[in-house]
Image: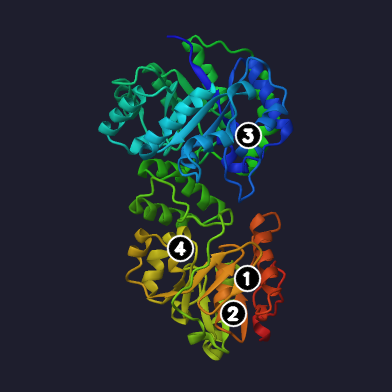
Amino acid sequence: MSKINLIECTLRDGGYYNNWDFDRKLVQEYIYSLNSIGITHIEMGFRSFQSKDFKGPNWYTTDNYIKSFKIPNRIKIGVMVNAYELISHKLNLKKAIDLLFSKKKLSRVNFVRLACHFSEFKKTIEAANILKKKGYQVAVNLMQISERTEKEIIEAGKLAKKSSIDILYFADSLGSMSDIHINKIVRNLALNWKGEIGIHTHNNLGLALSNTVTAIKRGVKWVDSTVMGMGRGAGNAQTEYLILELEKFQNKFYNNLNLLKLIKFYFEPLLQKYKWGINSYYYLAGKFGIHPTYIQEMINIKLSENKMLEGISQLKNYGASRYDVNLVRSEFQKPIKLKNGKWSPKSKMLRKEVLLVTSGPSLLDYKIEIENYISKFKPIVIALNSSTCINKKLIDFYVACNPLTLLSDIKKIKNSKKPIILPKSILSKNIASKLKSLKILDYGVGIAENKFDILDKCSRVPKLYTVAYALSVATSGQAKRILLAGFDGYGQDDRRTKIVDNIFYIYSSNKKAKQLLGITPSSYSFETKSVYAL
């Protein structure tokens, strides 16, 4: 068995956790450590046009960034490009590539990987041919191959055969494959493609390392790994383990003490902070063919265990093997263009008191008194989620704006038989079809940083958080004042506390803002008053 080529891609795949913003000292020590143990291929990040949201240097991985490091001569540097960015660019394909890449002799980059879906493969090969003419070694990375038929995989091998690409990679994007899948895919690609094959594995089922070894035994010559498995979702094959396995295949690595020091000093703290790796949710995602980014986003917004499981159940039925950015709108997502809804809150809330209730632990402590207040003073009660402990008969409306959170709440909201206020414009047809039995009040939404623009049938909000949307609904309805119950906060060290507090601050600075009054204990900065003193 000849030597296997290993591409270490922590700075690229690991960036899904830290926004590709790796500390410069870490990057330099990382390069030295890999060189010291004999790893020669490093994928330093993506190379991308996208610039609207903040992303760190390893998202762009410019030639100037690469040149700023001391890189041993034997190290070959690579970058990955999402082929869609080239194919969909407003300029033609060649001009788009010219914007990202100079000729090889002017760049420290040695190899380029183009990641594409099967539907993009033909155009991606065109891009690969252009990059080859510039002097780069080029690999094409076929994503989500587990979702493709044998016929489609064989056809991909035929297309690759006619191209000038150097390596044909395939990715277990959903982390759902077993050794049986690996064997079939390698066999079907190799029916026509006689060049070298590579594999990129994910660890949802805990099989990233063993699947990589299986692929090598079936003739794959290129493999990927990351330090401590740091990568999208459940992560990848771990470099520190894979190098031990590769010694069986004539790969010679030196004492990995420097790598272990790197892990101890830099990557163990990152693991504590971002908590990547296999867990029961990623395992279920692998079993059901759900894109791991959905799980990562649900963890980021800290859904409860029950909501996570319900969300996974709904995503299974949704057919969520391909990541749809429109389904996941958290604080990390791009601005959304404002679209009018069809319902005006004034029809129900004009000059009335509105009580927003959510599921903070304090709500249970004051449940009886809050219910007494509702029964006596008849405020309009809007619940921000279905898990609030307030008697469902006292709730007038539910409100939702994050499609992923909504998926986990659908069953309970349906059972309540109460109207739900939400922006129909952000729902996919698939989700909308699941809501047919609900009474939906369509109040539109858009996202604009640091803004509340509150209109009759829609509002711009600074973040697509349910609290921001609920505040805009009540304000558009010209409520007399807004009471808040169950808004405990997440604790001082939780980043969501600062985000939500900033939402309240931006709201209160708006000319249309109504008086906010918390009636249960809260760590947020709005005025509070005991429910007993109302």
User: Which residue was labeled with disc 2?
Assistant: 475
x then y, percent, for residue 301 = 55, 55
Q: Which residue is drawn at 47% across and 81% down?
A: 394
Q: How many marks?
A: 4
Q: In this view, does 176 lie to the left or right of 230?
A: left
The quadrant where residue 143 appears: top left
Q: How much space separates mark 2 and mark 1, taking CA atoms?
A: 10 Å
Please tell me whether mark 4 sits on a helix, a strand or a loop: helix
Amino acid at the residue labelled 3: Thr
Q: Nearer the viewer, residue 490 or 161?
A: 161
Above or below: residue 358 compared with residue 247: below
Q: Which of the image's four quarters has the N terminus?
A: top left
Q: Which mark is residue 426?
A: 4
User: Which residue was labeled with disc 3?
Assistant: 61
x then y, percent, for residue 369 = 58, 82
Dot 1, how many residues are within 10 Å of its Cα: few (below 14), some (14-19), or many (20+)?
many
Q: Earlier in the sequence, mark 3 or mark 1?
A: 3
Dot 3, how many residues are within 10 Å of its Cα: few (below 14), some (14-19), or many (20+)?
many
Above or below: residue 278 compared with residue 133: below
Please tell me whether mark 2 sits on a helix, a strand or a loop: helix
Q: Is residue 22 left or right of residue 171?
A: right
Q: How much space separates mark 3 and mark 1, taking CA atoms?
A: 35 Å
